[in-house]
Amino acid sequence: MTLQQQPRQGGVFRKFSLLSLIEAMATPHQLDRYLELVDPMTTVRDLRAEVTAVHRSTADTVTLTLRPTHQWQGFQAGQFVQVGVVIDGVRHTRCYSPACSQYRNDGRIELTVKAHPEGRVSQYLHRHAHTGLVVSLSQADGTFHLPSPRPDRILLVSGGSGITPVLSMLRSLLDEGYSGDLTFLHYAYTENDVSYRQELADIAAEHDNVRIVLAYTEQKEGGDLHGFFGTEHLDAVAPWYADAETFLCGPPGLMRGVKTLYADLGLGERLHLEEFAPPTVEISEDVDGDVSFTESNVVAVNSGRTLLEQAEDAGLTPAYGCRMGICFTCTSVKTSGCTKNVQTGETDSEPDKKIQLCVSVPVGDVTVEI
């Protein structure tokens, strides 16, 4: 360490010491709670984003361009972020995958959100998103991304709103000048349900090594393929698929079909996927015990479902976000009893421990602070 470096490090130390002092003086609220009263995009610690553009390319989707605050660290194509909005005074969080290239040079993020019939956040954003809207944002997360070095052959498969992470991969590969064999296979009900349809057509026209394939499951004319995924589709659009790495994101039916076929072909290790779906809970026949929600003075017979579902069945409304064990919005304290994590299969009997309600099922009597 040189003498010239010491004052700079000391300055950084003093800066954070001063920040800690100011935050201590702001107790019981964080400093950002006061700053947001002046400008929601002026933050010390909170990561937020402002909507700078809104576009609706299909009847049930909305594409948002977001400008993150200075804390944003970027992402790898395929990863997801957590977006939080306040609806009727309550903050709700959901996970969405950026659709833009990871190399986008203006530092902004593009999200395309499909308005699901019972999706509180997606419906809100589809109806009410506007330029100037400020949302909370998380750093990017997830293991669904392209390997490095890039494979010589890549097959991207998506369906419905699952187009966003694989489109991000496609855009990023093009920005890298990728020259290997690359097929993008997307499934939709009809051509009117395809987000980015014109851009995909332009990409196919401009890049000799890229094949864009649109498969329609309800429309009988137009497009490149019709019907559902199968070996014949693979042979038609990517006959080299056995030597490629395949990246998949889409609705449960498509996911099951691709996973089953790849397993049957012995290609499971070449399939990489992202699933935004709640974990499947198999209810045991020998379920017993009671679940006590202490803050609400409610006791319910254990049904074997997740604690989040059992709380809702009991008429309670605990906060939740993704329902997939990703966002930690539904974390509560288990004061006693044993729970099982439905994702990992691990059991936990430690008292006074924070657990995620959406992925925890009670094993016998359990007491939770809800």
Image (cartoon, rainbow, N blue to C red):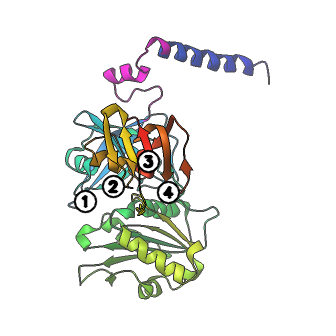
- Vertical order, 19 against 66 (above or below): above
Residue 338, x across and y down, in percent = 50, 46
Q: Is residue 39 a member of the stretch shown in magenta?
A: yes
Earlier-in-chain disc, 4 versus 1: 1
Residue 368, x across and y down, in percent = 41, 38
The segment highlighted magenta reads 24-47
Secondary-structure class at tag 3: strand
Judge left or right: residue 301 versus residue 275: left
Residue 22, x across and y down, in percent = 49, 13
Report, in whole angstroms, how far the alpha carbon at label 2 lies from the one at label 3: 12 Å
Report, in whole angstroms, how far the alpha carbon at label 4 lies from the one at label 3: 20 Å
Label number found at residue 112: 2
Image quarter where the C terminus lies is: top left
**Image depth: mark 2 or mark 3 in front:** 3
**Image depth: mark 3 or mark 1 in front:** 3
Q: Contact (CB < 8 A) between labels 2 and 1?
A: yes
Q: Which residue is mark 1?
A: 57
Question: Which amino acid type corresponds to the residue marked 2 in the rendered image?
Answer: Thr
- Vertical order, 42 against 114 (above or below): above
Q: Residues within 10 Å of mark 3 (few under 14, many from 20)?
A: many
**Image depth: mark 4 or mark 2 in front:** 4
Earlier-in-chain disc, 4 versus 2: 2
Q: Residues within 10 Å of mark 1 (few under 14, many from 20)?
A: some
Earlier-in-chain disc, 2 versus 3: 3
Label number found at residue 343: 4
Q: Which residue is mark 3?
A: 81
Earlier-in-chain disc, 3 versus 1: 1
